[in-house]
Image (cartoon, rainbow, N blue to C red):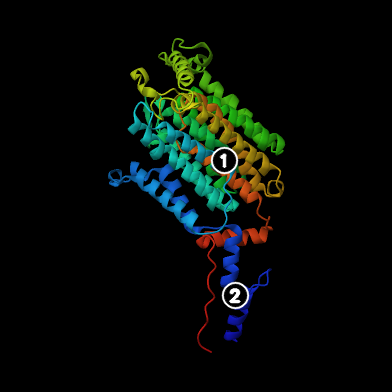
Amino acid sequence: MQERKFMNTQSQWAKDKDGSTGWMAARTQAVAKLGRRPFVYGALVTFSVLYYYRPEDFVPGLSYIPMARIAGVIGAVALAFGMMSGGRAKVPQVVKILWLLLLQMALCVPLALWPGGAFSRVFDNYAKGVIVAMLISMAVVTTWELRKLLWIQVSAVALVTVASILLDHFRDGRLQGIQKSILQNPNDLAINIAISFPIGLAFMLHARGFRKVLWGIALVFMALGVVLTYSRSGLLALILSLAICVWEYGIKGKRRSIVVVTVVALVIGLGAALSTAHYRARVESIFLGNIEGSGDKGSLDARKALLKKSILIAVKHPLVGVGPGCFLLVDQGWVVAHNSYTELAAEAGFPALFLFLWAVGASLKNIAQARKSTHYKEDSEFRLFTQALWAGILAYLAGACFASTEYTLYPYFMMAYTCAMVRISNQPLTDPVQGGEQRRLNRAIYDRIPQPQLISGR
């Protein structure tokens, strides 16, 4: 009887549409069909955790370990492994454009004002964004895998925001992130919140029970965090993000509660914020400049001057700029342009700006393509994430007008996610039962099918 059970189990693994036999053959064909690369995906998850959570900022002793370099090595090894592991993975247009942008930046290095600093900026910073985009396009083939990456991003931003508020982590009256790097500066923290907010809202809408409550609390803290950073660019990006979310989730998605809650929250939140003279003056300074009580300290006028300066440098050096990361050396001003578009043109020439905008446009085209898919129409989770990425990218485009983000990784994460959405939408849509089985299979060991064991004894 036991031997018969074993034979039945073995024959069950052997069944395949193509008529192939053997569970190993079935697994191999499934892996080849989806283009799965388990090691690459595992390395990608590790890279994302190290980038967003930055454990070296909180775990004693890790600060002495070059975690950033380790993350870069993990990404590079994973990329090399994925390219050598065989299979035909079509490189998305967005990734091709980012590789061209890397080439353009590399050509600018020898002619830079500071070649050593330009080399570091290109290959220690921007190149990681290209690697991340390539890894995501190679490894992410299911909604579950994409959801894990999105969860890492939004959970890190939410946790840093909540902890920063509860620990009263303020400097000069503005909220700062408790970690270093991308979530420390008030403006960068606010922009990341605006980008991640629609993703968090998608998780809340898809969650049930206590998890829905947790996501709701996190979103409240994230919105409050933008206000407490006193970031005008972050506020504008969040308002745009909220407007898209209301339209996509509330009006088009026929969720009236989203519209009602958002309107009530905006009225109460903005009413409370604008009732404070300092914050009201801060918001008014967006249009009126350095008015009394805004705490502007001339920053708006300074940024106008930096904008003009970056445009002028781009016109004087249209092909290769002054070198990646070298804008702050011009006139020894030691400040960035606070505009990703004009700074990129000033540092790497107009070809770099064209390629960057082309990559963004291709990402938006990816979202438009995903919207036309069967997955978008029939898979509610896929639809929520597609709408969230749409809102997040538009929020980034607004925030990038007031911050230098061209060498950070998070915009390239967002672009790469859209490539994953297209790849997922091209996969056959499974029924709920099969989808559940696939998710359980992924949770086990990505795509590993356990080998049936012979039960000894009679």
> Could you tell me residue 367's position as x and y percent?
64, 40
Picture layout, residue 31 above or below residue 167: below
63 left or right of 234 in image = left
Nearer-the-camera pick, 440 or 44: 44
* Residue kind at label 1, given as amino acid type: Val
Label 2 neighbourhood size at 10 Å, few (<14), some (14-19), many (20+)? some
Q: Residue at x 52, y 48 (%)?
A: 136
Judged from the image, the secondary structure of the residue bearing numbered disc 2 is loop
Residue 230 seen in render: yes
Picture layout, residue 194 above or below residue 137: above
Picture layout, residue 146 above or below residue 240: below
Q: Mark 2 to mark 1: distance in Å? A: 39 Å
Count the numbered circles shown: 2
* Residue kind at label 2, given as amino acid type: Gly
Nearer-the-camera pick, 347 or 66: 347
112 left or right of 3 in image = left
Q: Residue at x 32, y 44 (%)?
A: 66
Label 1 neighbourhood size at 10 Å, few (<14), some (14-19), many (20+)? many
> Could you tell me residue 380's position as x and y percent?
67, 47
Instruction: Read off the residue under disc 1.
Output: 94
- The quarter holding residue 60 reads top left
Judged from the image, the secondary structure of the residue bearing numbered disc 1 is helix
Picture layout, residue 191 above or below residue 311: below
22 left or right of 188 in image = right
Q: Residue at x 62, y 59 (%)?
A: 436
Instruction: Read off the residue under disc 2.
Output: 22
Residue 178 seen in render: no
- On-image quarter of the N terminus: bottom right
Name the N-terminal-most of marks 2 and 1. 2
For the residues carrying marks 2 and 1, which lies nearer the camera in this image? 1
Q: Residue at x 53, y 73 (%)?
A: 451
